[in-house]
Image (spheres, grey):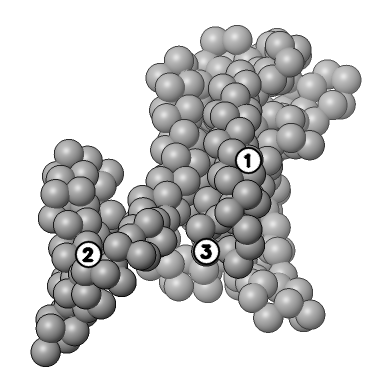
Amino acid sequence: MRRKFGNALRLVSLIIALGSLFTIQEDFKASVIGIFVFSMPLYAIGQIMRTGITKARENAFRWMWAYVYGVIIVPALFLSYEGYENLKEQTFSNSNFLLFESIATDYIGGFSIGFIMLLLLLFAFPFYETSLKNKRAIGIAAVLVTVVYAGYQYMMWADYRGVHGVDGLITHHWNGVQQIVPYEEIVEIVVQPYVKYASVSDPTDKTYFAWRLIFITEDEEQTTYRLGLDDDSLSKGNRMKQLAHSKGIPFYVIPLSEKQRDEFDFQLQLKELDNEPYYSFFEVK
């Protein structure tokens, strides 16, 4: 009976934890209280009742680390990535950027996910079947990698590109190198629709409609932004169209082919999007 009651308490604690995680962005304080004041103590009490005090003492660190790892570390790592990207975009968007991408240097821009995957492996050290000495070494490595990851995020704050409302096209790299293309050098802005077809060899791949926003300079150099079929991308496209008109830059939409039009209409229906604004932007009837 006591074992069943202990399992019930653990289940309740996990339900509270999940509820707190789902609402953490809306109410951070309430979520923290839910996890640390209610969920974690219930989990600990449930473990004690399920196994008894003696066994609970022997496995206390391992069991509590399982809770911390699953409820705190894993969500915190992924939320830190999402929150960092959102904060960066919001900060620069408020600095007169009409279109913004948080990464300008491709060859180091994707390291964040790599760091997160590595940290997930390292922070699982209490569960590894190895010596205490090795576990301590892995724990120290986890701390060091966390510090390096934080440093990487700090460095990458200065790595971005975008369309500035006043200065033009700005590309700023993490090492301080900056490139600016003023509007006077842009001779045309082109919208290029395309369909990315799913790979036959990859069952998880999908076919989708997307489009490129291409800025062409006097020297025929091109700067390309890739956007999708969604309201946010449409809003960005309309901002670029208004910008082109205000700066006297020709804005040209490449007509959709028959196959592109079929996929375009299918995706609009699938995503339950309002046809009219998309038809207007892509100049289709």
Q: Distance between the residues labelled 3 and 2?
A: 18 Å
Q: Distance between the residues labelled 1 and 2?
A: 28 Å
Taking the spot 57% from the left edge, 29% from the top edge, the residue there is 147
Q: Position of residue 162 (x, y in %)?
A: 60, 25
Q: Which residue bears the numbered disc 3?
A: 127
Q: Which residue bears the numbered disc 2?
A: 43
Q: What residue type is labelled 3?
A: Phe
Q: Is mark 3 on a helix, strand or loop?
A: helix
Left or right: residue 52 versus residue 85 is: left
**Mark 1 or 2 closer to N-term?**
2
Left or right: residue 1 versus residue 96 is: left
Q: Do tag 3 and tag 2 residues touch (Cβ < 8 Å)?
A: no
Taking the spot 84% from the left edge, 26% from the top edge, the residue there is 221
Answer yes or no: is residue 193 visible.
yes
- Vertical placement of 133 versus 18: above or below? above
Q: How far apart are marks 3 and 1 (CA)?
A: 16 Å
Taking the spot 55% from the left edge, 36% from the top edge, the residue there is 143
Q: Position of residue 92 (x, y in %)?
A: 48, 21
**Mark 3 or 2 closer to N-term?**
2
Q: Which amino acid does label 1 sit on?
A: Ala
Kindly identify which numbered label has been placed on residue 141.
1
Q: Nearer the viewer, residue 124 or 169?
A: 124
Q: What element carries label 2?
A: helix
